[in-house]
Image (tube, rainbow, N blue to C red):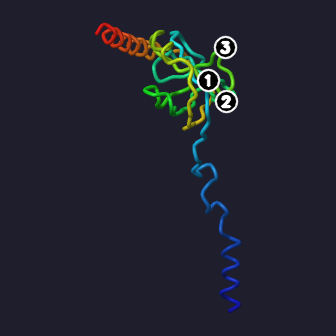
Amino acid sequence: MRIPFAALIALAVWTPASASPPSHQVARRPTIRYFIATAYSVEGTGASGKWSHPGTVAADRKVLPLNSRIRIYGAGRYSGDYTVEDTGGKVDGHHIDVYMPSQAEAKKFGHQRVKVVVLKYGDDEASPPDPQQKADAKAADRTVRAKENTTQKK
């Protein structure tokens, strides 16, 4: 009985501690927070270095760093996945500003309380401006505005 017990002790001592999965691979539940959401329609290069386009929001970098991926609930047709690519002078604390291509759409959105699930916290790094991304964003804005103008005429 002593030999198997000694072998078990020896095996336990010489087994590397890395046999368990690394702590950075542990699945974590997403962070859920409530924010006040407003909308903006000003085109330009945001704090992340990217041109404003649908699917982006401005947020306080202390709460949601640049390049964070979030999912918004409770915003009607504007609920969905967004990337934090901008900051703003009036965006402070638990307040996000959703980008919309037209000023009328932004005004209609108004001021709403929304649920935000943080899918991934960003690296808070700005990237150099990309002319292709800017052209693509402007084309997407034109498409949305054209669609809005045709629905308003009907």
- The type of residue carrying mark 3 is Gly
Q: Amino acid at mark 2?
A: Val
Residue 8 to residue 143: above or below: below
Q: Position of residue 102 (x, y in %)?
A: 45, 11
Label 1 and label 3: CA atoms lie apart by: 10 Å
Work out whether 143 lies above or below 37.
above
Give neighbour class at mark 3: few <14, some 14-19, many 20+ (Cα, 10 Å).
Answer: few
Contact between labelled residues 1 and 2, with CB atoms less than 8 Å apart: yes
**Residue behind mark 1:** 59
Would you identify the image quadrant in which residue 93 lies?
Answer: top right
| Residue that appears at 53% across and 17% down | 110
Q: Tell me the SS state at disc 3.
A: loop
What is the three-letter code of the residue carrying label 1?
Ala
Q: Earlier in the sequence, mark 3 or mark 2?
A: 2
Residue, far bottom = 1
Closer to the camera in the image, 122 or 118: 118
User: What residue would you read off at disc 3?
Assistant: 89
> Which element is circle 2 on?
loop
Badge 1: residue crowd in 10 Å (few <14, some 14–19, many ≥20)? many
Residue at numbered disc 2: 63
Residue at the image position 54 percent from the left and 32 percent from the top: 69
Residue at position x 68%, y 89% in the image: 3
Secondary structure of residue under mark 1: strand
Looking at the picture, does residue 49 appear above or below residue 67? above
Image-quadrant location for residue 40: top right
